[in-house]
Image: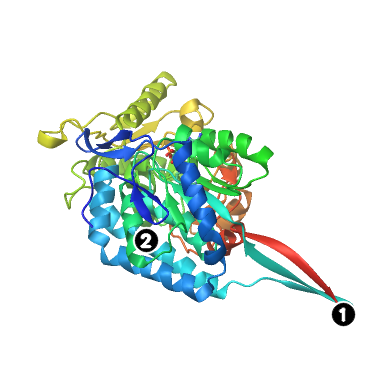
Amino acid sequence: MPTDKYIKNYIDGTLVPPGSGKYLDNYNPSTGKVYSYIPDSAADDVQKAYEAAERAFPEWSKSGLRKRFRILQRLADIIEQNLEEFARAESIDSGKPISMSRSVDIPRSHQNFRFFATAILHFSSESHHMEGRAINFTLRQPIGVVGCISPWNLPLYLFSWKIAPALATGNCVVAKPSEMTPMTAHLLAKACIEAGLPPGVLNIVHGLGPKAGQAIIDHPKIKAISFTGGTSTGKQIAQKAAPMFKKLSLELGGKNPNIIFADCDFDQMMVGTLRSSFSNNGQICLCGSRIYVERPIYEKFKEELVKRTQFLKVGDPFSSVTDLGALVSKSHMEKVMSYLALAEVEGGSILCGGEPVPMKGEFEEGYFLRPAVVEGLAYDCRTNQEEIFGPVVTIAPFDTEEEVLKYANSVQYGLSATVWTQDISKANRVAEKLEAGVVWINCWLLRDLRTPFGGMKSSGVGREGGLEALRFFTEPKNVCIKY
Ligand code: NAD
């Protein structure tokens, strides 16, 4: 499966160019150069994808659990067998270190297909007995044709996280990956053909959000939308989809607190905090970008964090010593740097990082930024309230639980939070009061695929993951039988 210069849409089981014949530039963020081309798809491509999905639905939805299990397993096998090729494609497209694509992105992608292939075999629904009169049972049926739209930060990881449960439950899918990172979705299309996925069951339409993505949202017969991306995009989608009564799952932005108590295991906490601050260049919705440290250990923490951050190696994603690769795009790097300028205007001091990394040779035009640590900011300033989504963390001391909870919950977001303490009572007390869909205690990004995943407040609506995803992609119907 060599990577192609011209990416194709995957419609009705075949790779096809966009109807308009127009393509968009696809950049390699490490070199700043265009290296391939993405279909600039429009509503007519989405319509063809929908029609193919509609044709495939009657057979796929009745194909039986074991057939769907076998095909999805085969797809997982193909991704696993071609891990290196998928990982290379992901790193070229997104700028992330190959070590991360090999150990996180691509393994999770095949695990998603495996998890939902097997989960569907064990999925069951409820029955409610009305003593002496009747029995109700909940019939869970696939919805029909559903839309899945994903972002650029964990490209195949999040694309497969949506597609796998949608297909396992018997739906047919029209999906769109991010236009910034389309390559592994293109490889997935080829893997689907190799796995023998029937034509039309999954259709992948590439292109811009406001054009191809919007056409999926606007389509009157695409009945459910699973979307992961920014909060403002989520808001636009909800405004359009809600009056059409589409089922919606929105996984949106975050501005997550990392709360460090003085009684934590300091070494473990430092390792975890460096990861939660700068993994994938801070471009993970779950990164802990606001770090609150109990005052007795604040100075020690600050010194250690700055030292370790300065030690991180930024550069060639394909080098084995690289910790941070390139940011995903020029405009994203400019956005991150504009927040660093804002932090200074708001009275913050940049303790380290924040400047572009001078690179030589092929990487001269790449989007490399040194990770930054900022202190001295009020909890309610813009830098501490808005999602930056880059290698930038702010640090601040606190004195009481009450105070840190006020800081932590002050943002419009409520995606995740991390707490470091050896006091189990305190950990539970704080977890109960945090406004976040996911709380990690003494760890970060430890994910069990069976658990519910999603955000509160402006971080989203609904939950994905495990049985929640299977429930989302099915329509529950109560059948009441009188006897
Ligand atoms: P984005 O909202 O710009 O784009 C996400 C996807 O939506 C892309 O495929 C894009 O093409 C498409 N899109 C854009 N406008 C659209 C429209 N009007 N109609 C339909 N589709 C449209 O987000 P992004 O910049 O790709 O990703 C970064 C954001 O995603 C961050 O805010 C991050 O926190 C969030 N994110 C959230 C989670 C989560 O699980 N909550 C996970 C990863 C990323």
Q: Earlier in the sequence, mark 2 or mark 1?
A: 2
* Residue 72 position by quadrant: bottom left
Q: Quadrant of the C terminus?
A: bottom right
Secondary structure, mark 1, is loop
Which residue bears the numbered disc 2?
192
Whether ligand 1 has any atom under 8 Å from the Cβ at mark 2 is answered as no
Compared with 165, 461 (above or below) is above
Q: Residue furthest right?
A: 132
Instruction: Decide if residue 418 is on the left or right side of residue 135.
Output: left
Residue 118: % across, % down: 48, 72
Instruction: Decide if residue 330 is on the left or right side of residue 444.
Output: left
Seen at 53% across and 66% down, the residue is: 59
Q: Name the foreground residue: 351 vs 251.
A: 251
Residue 32: % across, % down: 22, 33
Q: Where residue 483 is drawn, which disc sits there?
A: 1
Secondary structure, mark 2, is helix
- Amino acid at the residue labelled 1: Tyr
- Amino acid at the residue labelled 2: Cys
Q: Residue furthest top?
A: 345
Q: Name the foreground residue: 407 vs 242.
A: 242
Residues at circles 2 and 1 in contact by the CB criterion of under 8 Å = no
Residue 224: % across, % down: 59, 49
Q: Name the foreground residue: 254 vs 240.
A: 240
Q: In 3D space, how far apart are the residues under numbered discs 2 and 1 (Cα atoms)?
A: 47 Å
* Residue 234 position by quadrant: top right
Crowd class of label 1 (few under 14; some 14 to 19; many from 20; radius 10 Å): few
Residue 446: % across, % down: 43, 59
Can residue 396 be seen in this snapshot? Answer: no
